[in-house]
Amino acid sequence: MPVGRKEQIVDCRAVMGLGEGGGLAQRGTLAEALRNDVIVVAMSPGRRHITKPVCEITYGIRETGIQTSVLVLNAGSGQAPDESGRSYGSTFGIKPEEAAQINRHKLCVVHFGNVISHIVHKARLLLKYVKIPTIIVCQAPLDMEDLAKAGVKTRDVKPVEPQTVGTVVDIVTGVVRGESCPQHKIDEIVMKIKKYLR
């Protein structure tokens, strides 16, 4: 029985990062694995890198031998343009080339934040263009019913008027943005990924 880790080659970054730590992930960058099994989508980078739970989640998935790409959206922060009661500031969006990069994979894992209305509207916009099965990771106690009410297709609850081509197949809650991801949450994410890759 072999001992050790499985090697993974990651084609790191479509563009160079900015400033100090130039090879780190910035907006609009993709780190593509050898095989297009899973893609983890981050909303926006931190000061110098992708937000803390996303890098830990990605590392945890890769540790189990699953080929994992990472995409940091160019316009991932802010609220969706169709969200009522929007404040001024950045607007969430997805470029056609980003949707194409995601759709080359078998499964999408996307990390959102802690406001249910923001998550629902972002998920609806994202899944209008992302066709592959998607697992949502977030802090808020989101459920399939919340998504279906907004027209997002889900595995368990069918929306009255579907507004997405993609489907949410699972949700992992309790993962805080900008904080370390507990090992039991990484294990839960990996377990759900394996279920859908079979």
Image: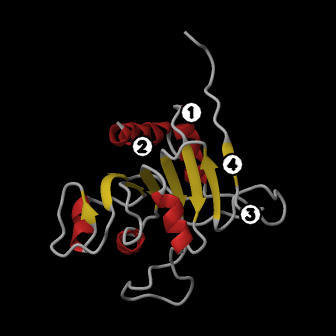
The residue lying toward the viewer, choosing from 85 and 39, is 39
Image coordinates for residue 184, horizontal then vertical, percent = 44, 37
Of 49 and 29, which appears nearest the observer?
29
Q: Are marks 1 and 4 in contact (CB under 8 Å)?
A: no
Residue 38 in the image, given as x and y percentages of width and height: 48, 47
The residue sitting at 19% across, 69% down in the picture is 159
Q: Secondary structure at mark 3?
A: loop
Q: What is the distance, in whole Å, between disc 3 and disc 1 at their CAs?
A: 25 Å
Q: Is residue 129 above or below residue 196?
A: below
Dot 2 falls on a residue whose secondary structure is helix
For the residue marked with disc 4, what is the amino acid? Asp
Q: Tell me the element at label 1.
A: helix
The CA span between labels 2 and 3 is 28 Å
**In the rendering, which numbered label is found on residue 189?**
2
- Examine the image and state in which quarter residue 122 appears: bottom left
Determine the CA span between mark 1 and mark 4: 17 Å
- Quarter holding the C terminus is top left
Q: Earlier in the sequence, mark 3 or mark 1?
A: 3
- Check disc 4 and report its element: helix, strand or loop: strand
Q: Earlier in the sequence, mark 2 or mark 3?
A: 3
* For residue 107, side relative to residue 13 (left or right): left
Residue located beneath label 1 in the image: 63
Quadrant of image for the N terminus: top right
Q: What type is the residue that disc 1 sits on?
A: Glu
Task: Using the image, tell me which numbered label, if any, was put on residue 103.
Answer: none
Which is in the foreground here, disc 4 or disc 2? 4
Circles 3, 4 touching at the beta carbon (< 8 Å): no
User: Badge 4: few (under 14), some or many (20 or more) residues near its Cα, within 10 Å?
Assistant: few
Point out residue 69 in the picture as x, y percentages from the top left corner.
57, 49
Identify residue for label 4: 11
